Amino acid sequence: MVKSLVQFVIVCSLVTGSFLIPFTSYADDMGSSVPSDLQNLKESVLDLNKQLTQLEDELLYPSSESALFVSIEVGSTVRLVDINVLLDGQHVAYHYYSPQEYAALTKGGMDRIFHGNISTGQHEIKAIVTGYDPLGKSFQRVVSYSFVKGQDRKFIELRLSDDANKSQAEFDFHDWDINH
């Protein structure tokens, strides 16, 4: 009887995601061994719930997660028109920047242009950037960045800015160190 009651409580706790002990008065009547058994059971279920939560986090937020962000240095006069992104030679993203999006970027905003899962190992990002330099001349540049993807997540920023003479656009890639 006690074993079936314990099995019932375990099934209920797994289905509902919580552990309830509605039978404490019944357990008090059964003697001193039942409350200690229930306490052990409660600890086991809590440990199981912790493990399930960790597995759920790993499935929802895998360590292979990677992203590429685009930003423009505040005060820069580089005018960004669009970006086409290739990862290991495969097209993964394209975005045309409206005047409103460009204005947000020049005020410190960032755009997540790519978000996906990347395997561990050596990779290369190529970004084909179209825009206008600080002098108003149109340009199209291909900028590349090689990186090694480890076990952790990888977040990379492509920052556009003016050069020292404010005559050309500069591009700089930056790795973010983010741990769980």
Image (tube, rainbow, N blue to C red):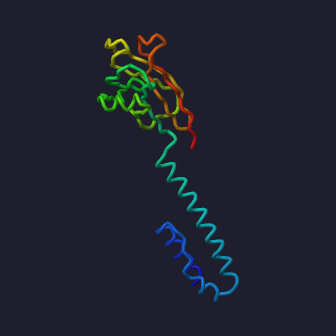
In the image: residue 37, left or right of residue 119: right
Give the x, y percent position of residue 17.
49, 66
Give the x, y percent position of residue 69.
44, 31
| Total tally of numbered discs in the picture | 0
Give the x, y percent position of residue 31.
68, 86
Asked which quadrant contains residue 68, the reply is top left
Look at the picture and state if 31 lies above or below 89. below
Tell which residue pokes out farthest to the right in this image: 32
Look at the picture and state if 88 lies above or below 27. above
* Residue located at (33% from left, 28% from top): 94
Q: Nearer the viewer, residue 133 or 43?
A: 133
Tell which residue pokes out farthest to the front in this image: 75
Tell which residue pokes out farthest to the bottom in this image: 29
Asked which quadrant contains residue 105, the reply is top left
Q: Nearer the viewer, residue 172 or 103?
A: 103
In the image: residue 31, left or right of residue 78: right
Quarter the C terminus occupies: top right
Give the x, y percent position of residue 103.
35, 29
* Residue located at (43% from left, 23% from top): 75
* Residue located at (44% from left, 31% from top): 108
Quarter the N terminus occupies: bottom right
Look at the picture and state if 133 lies above or below 102. above
